[in-house]
Image: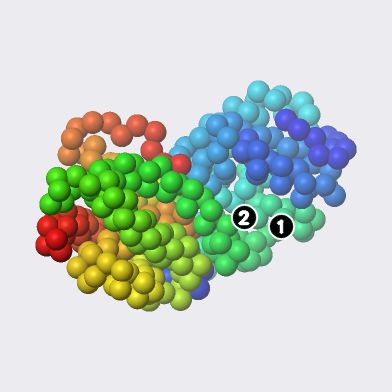
Amino acid sequence: MKTFRYLENVAMLELDVDSCIGCGMCVTTCPHRIFCLEGKKARIVDLGACMECGACALNCPVDAIHVNPDDKCGCATLLIKSWLAKYTGKDIGGGCC
Amino acid sequence: MYAVDSPSADSPVVVTANYKLTFDIVRRDLKTVDAWLLAVDTRGVNVWCAAGKGTFSTDEVAYQVKRAGLDTIVNHRTLILPQLSATGVDCLKLKSACGFRGVFGPVRISDLPDFLENDLQADESMRSVTFTLKERAELIPVEVFLRIKPLFLVLLVMLPISGIGPGIFSLDQAIDRITLFLAATGAALLAGTVATPLFLHVLPFRQFWLKGAFASLLCALPFILWCVPIAGWLLTGTLTLWILAAGSFLAMNFTGSTPYTSLSGVELEMRRGLPLQMALSAVALVSWLISPFIQG
């Protein structure tokens, strides 16, 4: 998405090009179109647009992609609850909306 | 399992969530197509959230396919999944899980008929998530509504403590001051839950807490002009700090409603924004408590 830019170099996303078999599942599943296929290999063309949804990693048949392993959605309220849970040792329960 | 129009054994199978709003829109937009509709149990949550939370999963789809006896209903072995379910569904694993292969359809339901007509091909726009003005504006009522309960709790605390002054406690003082507090909170709400979504990419800075602080500064200006003549500089200054802290916090919370912020990014900006918001609020609170004693 070109109009909305967030923080450019923060997303935890890695593609192991050596393992990549060029199936194109990452290109298909990414909601922000950050992958492209060049010949027989995929490439990340816009890391800054990655929102760490994990669709690419889940659908990669050879596990060549690694994304931030933490919960796939995270609003500020959920983060605060999880930080409080860490400090107080109590379970947050439920979560967001 | 549901039928849209008059599907046959060769008609496509579209998979969706059992969130009423989603389901109704799928049924409506597919009106012109003969199709089977399989609703998986996402506990009434929409596709993308359910996929992220793990309820719209490969296992759940496989389970529902087997439960419906889909292999006896259709001749083909293809399931069309919403693209946004890709966060929870490994479509290549579906074949071994239930005998049906998964294909990711478009992001938006309205593109489904074209997708089905074009031999299950999607173009770039069909696979891209947007965040238009209309989509952002639609979030505002929810954002505001979610603030009602916390606001009520804050008022429960603020009302009694606003009456603390030289005369130990004065209800008149409390009521006068709570009115100012409400106006200031209104300005913060305007900045954080209305202006921030509407002018999201126009507001400066990338981090939402900073966008919120900027919007709060702007919303604070008319408040200051109104408040100084009636309450003086000390109270106005105190409440302006509150507008900045609350507006910034509310804007920061909006990250959870956007389709483009990363968890890593939100965590980073919260580690920066939250301490500042808490510090500003603390200073404002102390000033609020001692101001009746200073102004007499």
Q: Quadrant of residue B255?
A: bottom left
Q: Sort mark 2 into few (<14), some (14-19) or many (20+) by Cα contacts within 10 Å.
A: many
Three-letter amino acid code of the residue under disc 1: Asp
State the residue position of label 2.
B107
Residue B290, percent across and down?
13, 56
Q: Quadrant of the C terminus of chain B?
A: bottom left
| Residues marked 1 and 2 touching at CB (< 8 Å) | yes
Label for residue B111? 1
Q: Residue at x 66, y 52 (%)?
A: B105
Give residue B279's position: percent from left, percent from top: 17, 58
Of B239 and B107, the residue lying toward us: B239
Single out the residue that lies furthest toward the right. B6
Q: CA distance from mark 1 to mark 2?
A: 8 Å
Please state the horizontal and vertical placement of residue B155, each as a whole percent of the image. 33, 46
Drawn side of residue A60 relative to residue B161, left or right: right
Closer to the camera, B294 or B25? B294
- Left or right: B291 in relation to B1: left
Q: Is residue B283 visible?
A: no
For badge 2, the amino acid type reads Val
Viewer-proximal residue, B170 or A10?
Answer: B170
Q: Residue at x 80, y 56 (%)?
A: B117
The location of residue A4, given as percent across then percent down, is: 47, 70
Question: Subunit of mark 2?
Answer: B
Answer whether residue B200 is visible to the viewer in this image.
yes
Could you say whether the residue bearing mark 1 is in a helix, strand or loop? Answer: helix
Name the element at disc 2: loop
